[in-house]
Amino acid sequence: MAVPWELLISTAGGVAATVVGVIAGGIVGRRSQNRQWLQGTQTAAYERFLQAFGAVEAELREAFLEEREPAAHVWGPFNAGVQSLSLVATREAATAALQLCDVVEDFTILFHGRQSTDLEELRPIHSALEEAHLKFVNAARRSLDASQEHLDQTLGGPSPWRGVVSFHAQRATPDGAE
């Protein structure tokens, strides 16, 4: 009995389509898994960096206003956060993080050989920190999801300037003096 060619061709076509479907599904699935892993890893790195930045910024600000040297314990987590970013950040987020690091470095320079807590020395640094922080947050948000809206201000980060001025004023009065 002869095998009908139509049956053989349609069976072979079905097998080939199934094999191609399985291979394509594996490729698409792996690509999706990689994208999910990267997004989760980026989110964790961005969070670590922002938390460490918050600790460094607060310590530098408090040390400046209290006329003391900054504590060294905040730099380890900050440097680790920067290193984590170098592994997974997009170019835009990495550039924004570097800008933020540059402003933090400018802030540390204020401590070299100074005694006073002149707020006018701190004002441009504070403004630059706010701007760089917002730029990093927006870059990180866009890298995680391009549909994220651009923020005009962030939650967290450098405290409002009025808070810095208020703290400084308290320290300048006899009631706030140590």
Image (cartoon, grey):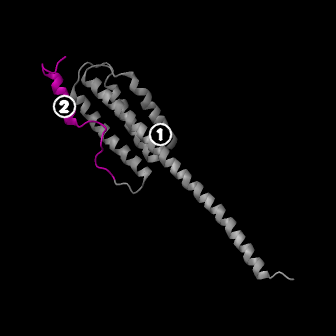
Per the image, label 2 sits on a secondary structure element best described as: helix
Q: Tell me, yes or no, whether the highlighted magenta stretch contains residue 45.
A: no
Tell me the quadrant of the picture where the C terminus can be found.
Answer: top left
Q: Residues within 10 Å of mark 1 (few under 14, many from 20)?
A: many
| Residue drawn at (75%, 77%) of the image | 9
Of 17 and 61, nearer the camera is 17
Left of 73 or right of it: where is 129?
Answer: left
Residue 69 % position (x, y): 32, 20
Residue 44 % position (x, y): 45, 41
Per the image, label 1 sits on a secondary structure element best described as: helix
| Residue drawn at (72%, 74%) of the image | 13
| Residue drawn at (62%, 58%) of the image | 27
Left of 85 or right of it: where is 178?
Answer: left
Q: Residues within 10 Å of mark 2 (few under 14, many from 20)?
A: some
Instruction: Please tell me whether residue 77 is drawn above or below residue 93 in the rendered image.
Output: above
How many labels sit on residues? Answer: 2
Tell me the quadrant of the picture where the N terminus can be found.
Answer: bottom right
Q: Which amino acid, mark 1?
A: Leu
Would you name the residue on which mark 1 appears?
A: 85
Q: Which amino acid, mark 2?
A: Val
Query: Most extreme residue toward the right, as rendered?
Result: 1
Give the image quarter of residue 159: top left
Would you name the residue on which mark 2 appears?
A: 165
Residue 54 % position (x, y): 34, 34
Of 10 and 129, nearer the camera is 10
Q: Earlier in the sequence, mark 2 or mark 1?
A: 1
Q: Report, in whole angstroms, how far the alpha carbon at label 2 lies from the one at label 1.
A: 33 Å
Instruction: Please tell me whether residue 134 is drawn above or below residue 3 in the rendered image.
Output: above
| Residue drawn at (38%, 36%) of the image | 51
Instruction: Please tell me whether residue 25 is drawn above or below residue 129 in the rendered image.
Output: below
Give the image quarter of residue 79: top left
